[in-house]
Structure formats: structure tokens, C-alpha cells
Amino acid sequence: MALVCVCSKAPDGKRFIATSSATKVTIVAEENDRETQGQDVGVVTLNAAQTPAVGGESVVAMTASRQGQLLAVVTSEKRLVVWEESGEWRVRGERSVAKRVTSLQISEDEQYLLTADKTGTVTRYRLSDISCDGEEMMGHLSMILDMVMVSHDSHVITCDRDEKIRVSRYPNCYNIETYCLGHTEFVSCLCLCEKWPHLLVSASGDGTVRSWEWRNGRLLDTHHFSEDGQDPVTVTQVVCSRNMEQPLIVATVEG
């Protein structure tokens, strides 16, 4: 499955979109950038000379820093690689991870990388030396399926296979701010809306996309993708618009 993430704002003010294929991550200029519209501006290959070659390796999780200078991926072989943009994309560091990672986030100050894994654990690594042991930050009782960090790194929001969305204070993640409860199947993905910082969007195996006021867990709206009497579809990805007067949410579903 292809993954997509947005490097929110590069140092020169331009935005970039990173997409993964089986063995590489391609970084392209955002569609409204007239100078490089639609052009590839960087490619990081998983089996390039500067990284160990691993046959059959693919990207399972990916994230970019908000400033657009760091890109991190985890592969199917449990290899975590961080690239840094300094004129061209170069490997900043890499390590192996013990458990299968399901989601990644880079802190806004670009000091830390957070991983969520299938055991329900969130681990934090220092980006200054990614090879050092990580610090366990929080845990769920079931597999974490997605994770997002709120602007200014004030909170971490996670979702799991047990229908729960948890809002935790950061870095003291043992302090739970609230839960967003209402899904009836696993919560597959989360999305924060940049222009509407109070808004959280979630998608689920119950065939719904829901919007929340994440600070208090209040449900704002629910959209059903399955008609009455039909088996629910799984919504696999949601993206929220940045530049429109009203939030526009785009969702993809299985099948």
C-alpha cells in the first residue's frame, strides 16, 4: 500500500508531498508551486548505496517534520531510517526496531521521533542520536493504529483496535486529557486540520468518518459510507484541506 505524507513547510516557504512505493520515497513539489509544479524534487531509495540493501523491503510507516527538513520511514524489515534535506536528501541516521511500527511522528522542534507499534506502545527517540535506546512514553491495551501530534507538541492523540481515541498530554503522556468515543469498530486513522486546530478527524472499520473537538472529546459530525443493511466498509485514510473557507475532508475506502 502506498503511503502519503505532507512536509508542511520547507525553509524556503514551499510545501512538499512525500509518497512511498515498494522501494523508494519520492518527494514532489506541492501542486500550487508554479516553479516546480508536479516535478520530483528528491528521491530517497531504501536500498541506495548509503543504506544497507534489504531484498523485498517496503515502507510500512512514514512521516515528515513540519518544517520539511526531516523525513522518517520504517520498513517491513523493522528498519527505521531518517533522512535530512540539506541541498539534497541524505541519511541522518538509522536503527532497527524490535516491534512492528504502525505510525511515526516527528516533534515540532525536531528533537524527537515518536513511534507507535502493534503492542500498543509509544516510544520516543532522540533525533540527535537515533541509535540510542528509546524512552517508553505511553501504552494502550491493544494495537495502536495511528498517531498524530498537536501543534506546538502539547498533546499526542492515538487510536487503537479497541475503538478508542486517546488524547494525552505531551511529554507527560500518562496524563490523559480525554477520550473521543463513539466508533464501533477499530479506528484506522486520524487527521488534524491545520487551519482548524480544534478539529480532529477519525476513520474506522465501522464505515464512518467522524469529526471531533479533541480537547473535550465532543463528537461534532458523523458521515456513514455504508447504507443501512450493508456491511460496513473500512475507511483507510483521511486528509483535511488547508486553504478552504470550510473544512473539506477526503477519505479513501477499501474496495
Image (spheres, rainbow, N blue to C red):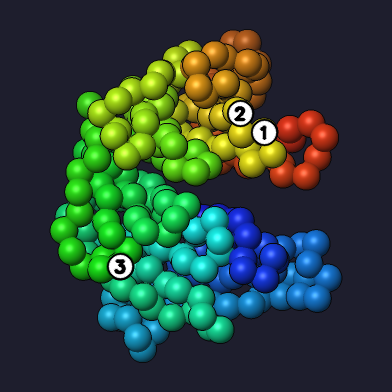
Q: Earlier in the sequence, mark 2 or mark 3?
A: 3
Residue indicated by mark 1: 196
Residue at 46%, 18% (x, y): give it: 180
Residue at 57%, 21% (x, y): give it: 213
Residue at 32%, 81% (x, y): give it: 51
Q: In which quarter of the image is residue 166?
A: top left
How many C-alpha atoms fall within 10 Å of the one at disc 3: few (<14), some, or many (≥20)? few
Tag of residue 199: 2
* Quarter in which the C terminus is drawn: top right
Q: Earlier in the sequence, mark 1 or mark 3?
A: 3
Q: Is residue 82 above or below residue 254?
A: below
| Separation (CA) of disc 1 from disc 2 | 6 Å
Q: Where is residue 43 in the image (x, y as percent from the top left)?
A: 54, 77
Q: In this view, does 207 lie above or below 104?
A: above
| Separation (CA) of disc 1 from disc 3 | 32 Å
Q: Quadrant of residue 61?
A: bottom left
| Separation (CA) of disc 2 from disc 3 | 32 Å
Tell me: 107 left or right of 244.
left
**Circles 1, 3 touching at the beta carbon (< 8 Å):** no
Q: Is mark 1 on a helix, strand or loop?
A: loop
Which one is in front, 44 or 206?
Answer: 44
Which one is in front, 72 or 173?
Answer: 173
**Circles 1, 2 touching at the beta carbon (< 8 Å):** yes
How many C-alpha atoms fall within 10 Å of the one at disc 2: few (<14), some, or many (≥20)? some
Q: Is mark 2 on a helix, strand or loop?
A: strand
Tag of residue 128: 3
User: Is residue 80 visible to the viewer in this orientation of the structure?
Assistant: no
